[in-house]
Image (cartoon, rainbow, N blue to C red):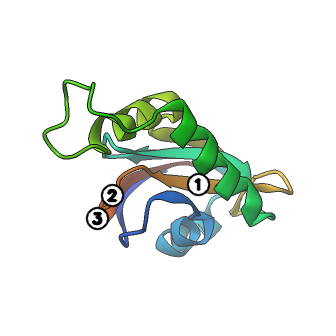
Amino acid sequence: MWQQTLIQLKARPRGFHLITRDIEAALPELSEYQTGLLHLLLQHTSASLSLNENADPAVRRDFERFFNRLTPWHSEYEHADEGPDDLPAHFKASLLGCQLSLPIQNGRLALGTWQGIYLGEHREQGGSRRILATLHGI
């Protein structure tokens, strides 16, 4: 069985946000799959998807501080048409990636105890984000 759904996420401020519940809520049919895969593709170049700590919000704040030090804003970038956060957002998105493949087991995402799906919003005004979700399994 194959299924595809376009998920529209609300706009969020710059930072790392847990979106596991948003994904699960947008895919009620997930419960019909005993075994399978969920592939998520974020259709943007200035945001990212990753899988990490879902319990302590300090981890997400530390992620934001780390990546801001790694990709600082400054005027030396040639690509700055959309503002000083534009190219740093592309760097972060490339480093972290825009897709995840997650196992499905007994109608649920088979994530580890402390794992959650992060949306990395790397723009000051990124707007709403789209994720194309593809379910495959039995």
Q: Which amino acid type is shown beneath numbered disc 1?
A: Tyr
Number of the front mark, 2 or 3? 3
Disc 1, SS = strand
Quick check: marks 2 and 1 in contact, CB under 8 Å? Answer: no
Number of the front mark, 1 or 3? 3
Image spot of residue 83 (x, y percent): 21, 46
Separation of marks 2 and 1 at Cα, in angstroms:
14 Å
Of 126 and 39, nearer the camera is: 126
Of 26 and 71, nearer the camera is: 71
Task: Identify residue for label 1.
Answer: 118
Q: Please report the residue visible at 46 percent of the width from the left and 44 percent of the height from the top.
A: 48
Q: Which amino acid type is shown beneath numbered disc 3?
A: Gly
Quick check: marks 2 and 3 in contact, CB under 8 Å? Answer: no
Q: Is residue 59 left or right of residue 4?
A: right
Task: Identify residue for label 3.
Answer: 127
Regarding residue 38, the answer to whether it shows in the image is: no
Image spot of residue 95 (x, y percent): 50, 28
Number of the front mark, 2 or 1? 1
Q: Please report the residue visible at 41 percent of the width from the left and 54 percent of the height from the top.
A: 3
Q: Please report the residue visible at 52 percent of the width from the left and 57 percent of the height from the top.
A: 15
Q: Furthest residue to the front?
A: 75
Question: Which comes before the other along the chain, label 1 or label 3?
Answer: 1
Q: Furthest residue to the right?
A: 113
Disc 3, SS = loop
Q: Which amino acid type is shown beneath numbered disc 2?
A: Arg
Disc 2, SS = strand
Question: Which comes before the other along the chain, label 2 or label 1?
Answer: 1
Q: Is residue 1 left or right of residue 105?
A: left
